[in-house]
Image (cartoon, rainbow, N blue to C red):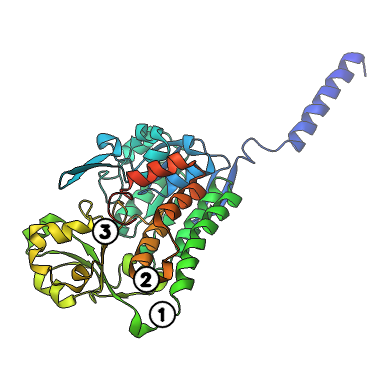
Amino acid sequence: MNKCARVLFSVLLLLTFAVLTVEPIGAEEFKTVTDMRGVEVSIPEDPQRVVAISRSLIDTTMYIFGVEDKLVGGSVWKRNDGYEDYTWGSETYHVCPWISFVLNPNYRNLTNVGGFGGPYGTVNVETIASLEPDLLILRDLGNDDEAVQKFLESMEQLNIPTVVLKYPDCYDDIDVSTIYEEVRLLGEVFDRQEEAERIVDHMDAQVQLIRERTADVDEDETPRVLYFGAPSQAADSGGVGYAFGTETIESIFLEDIVNAKNAYDGTGTDIISTEHLLALDPDVIILSTYSGYHPPREMYEAERFGKVQDLRALKEGKVYSLSATPCKSERLEFPINLMIEAKAIYPERFEDIDLDEWIRDYFMGLYNVDEEKAEELMDSLLLRYLEII
């Protein structure tokens, strides 16, 4: 074998060895996760272009993970950069219930792809395809199974890997643990498992605190609480407001975690008349965000509530408001509303909890933000103005 032949043989040998020992391109670029449908999904090891369809939780979790810049689209409320002016009496408040906008103003620049319910419009497959995502994450709210299934089929046809989270309402037995499962799955998707556990531990510590302090309340001593939606347009339908029934997530968390009774024995969220509200006569009224933000003084001062001033809760000053959050949005902040409820219902058991300080600490611990940003988050949810602190 001459010198040229030996060189050629050596090169061919090296190339052959390389082919045999180097992993095929892309072999380590994908991984498989099992989503909350129980479906195994092959996703990029390090996704770069993510679309998130949810009412928060996904985007805020990504913020904590430090991967928020990977978002290219989602369910994004575009009007007024997510802020709204809310006026009651002589005061006007600047409200932004979209926590992600406050944490990272760049979220406002994301492309809105719609959603399943809410103010985002119908989910738009063409818009999603134009963003060329390498991963889509959907939080299924359980409110439109047929539409979600058709959407998932469209994503499969477009070869867009889709991971599905499931909101607690998707299950027959609603439990807070499924929210933790969502966070853990996101930790697996973005390879942030330790940070996901930290988030879960932070949320669950507050849940267990509430449970432990109320667990020994005897059943015959638990207050009757009405979780109430009070939009002015209820009168257009012949009612005074909306009562949340026993099968709503609000009621289930109220009874399971706070250990209080639902004063309304219906199952869904139903409009009720003035007479029905008077007959219920709850010990405590909790006002939720419902087509607007409702401070306690609205029930005392608004003309439409003039006929219910003899309610026990009004006479004893036991009407309380929750934070300004969109409906059906159990997000990373859900322990805040639970603590507000717990302190309102059992003030003596939470006498040592200063809500202003507690909520600020919760935000700082959850999002790793400083005190100034935590207070901005509190202001955005009307936590300083709806008379809960």
Residue 166 visible in the displayed image: yes
Does residue 5 appear to the left or right of 378 in the view shown? right
Counting from the top left corner in percent of width and height, residue 303 is at 7, 58
Q: Earlier in the sequence, mark 3 or mark 1?
A: 1
Tell me the number on the disc at residue 7: none
Q: Quadrant of the N terminus?
A: top right
Disc 1 is placed on an element classified as loop
Counting from the top left corner in percent of width and height, residue 44 is at 55, 41
Which residue matches tag 1? 217
The Cα–Cα distance between marks 3 and 1, rounded to whole angstroms, is 25 Å
Q: Amino acid at mark 1?
A: Val
Residue 36 visible in the displayed image: no
Q: Amino acid at mark 2?
A: Tyr
Q: Residue at left 37%, top 83%?
A: 219
Q: Residues within 10 Å of mark 1 (few under 14, many from 20)?
A: few
Of residue 106 and residue 5, the one placed in the foreground of this image is 106
Q: Earlier in the sequence, mark 1 or mark 2?
A: 1
Relative vertical location of residue 222 with respect to residue 55 in this rendering, above or below: below
Counting from the top left corner in percent of width and height, residue 259 is at 39, 74
